[in-house]
Amino acid sequence: MSTEKTQYALNLLESAFINTKPRGVGCSFGKDSVTAVHLARRIDPNIPVFSIMTIFKPKETFEYLVEINRLLNLDVLVYMVAERVPQILIDNGIKVELLSPDNFREAQGTHENFLHTEDVDRCCHLLKVVPIQKAVANYDVLIDGLRSSEGITRQNLQEIEITGELTKIHPILHFTEEDIFEYLKKNDIPIHPWYLKTFPDGKRYRSLGCAPCTRPIFDHESERDGRWQGSKKEGGECGIHTNQIKPSKQNSPLQKTFVMEKQDYNC
């Protein structure tokens, strides 16, 4: 990848951080969000990092969270709808805000099969959207790891987006999949082990979510085509990035103060 892309991302964050706080960065512990966290920490070493975990995340994601949290000294705060905190998080001193599973239990009880096979939108809303609403309640600015080349749902994103009371910053919007892996390698950051899995037909994992809703795909497919395969959400979004997670009361602090010349990248 070009050093210009990295520098542009850093300049974007630095300019945005001048007049705005409180702020935080969300991390799912996939390749993109870890890159965004690392970039944000280069500008603000103390920026809070939070993560939305679910009971359906693969064990490798929890193990990777622990590894990266220790390596990058993130002091991550995990929000999770569950009956109890996963033992691996307890054993490794990860901070967890456990949210009541009552609504999820009630919704799942109305389905013969798991909720994620019967009503994926409802499942994602209860396990992901509701927790992030809690996570960003005290933030004015959210940094995330969205990229425009991931899939059709993200092609028209802007680097700075105002959604209700929350200003979203997408510092790696112009990075490609190859850029991400190169950045992580250059900065000696290990990648999630699922990205290293190989399959006889040539498929690989390219976008990670909950285990039941994540499938390996071919290189010619869009990165998110492996998400929610066979459902109406296939290749789409869980709702975290498409819902207004912090309703509007007044203009965002960045709406009038942020000015930066955009750079065109052929991604």
Image (tube, rainbow, N blue to C red):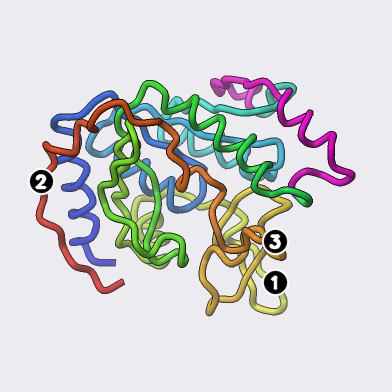
On-image quarter of the C terminus: bottom left
Q: Which residue is mark 3?
A: 231
Earlier residue among tags 2 and 3: 3
Residue furthest toward the front? Answer: 249
Which residue has dot 1 on it? Answer: 199
CA gap, disc 2 and disc 3:
41 Å
Q: Determine whether 65 is above or below 157 in the image.
A: above
Q: Which mark is residue 259?
A: 2
Q: Residue at x 78, y 29 (%)?
A: 105
Q: Judge whether residue 102 is colored magenta.
A: yes
Residue 13 shown in magenta: no
User: What secondary structure is found at the residue carrying circle 2?
Assistant: loop
Q: The residue under label 1 is which amino acid type?
A: Phe
Cα–Cα span, label 1 and label 2: 46 Å
Q: Nearer the viewer, mark 1 or mark 2?
A: 2
C-alpha distance separating marks 1 and 3: 23 Å
Foreground disc of the pair 1, 3 = 3
Say which of marks 2 and 3 sits in front: 3
Mark with earlier residue (1, 3): 1
Viewport quadrant of the N terminus: bottom left
* Residue 76 in the image, given as x and y percentages of width and height: 47, 28
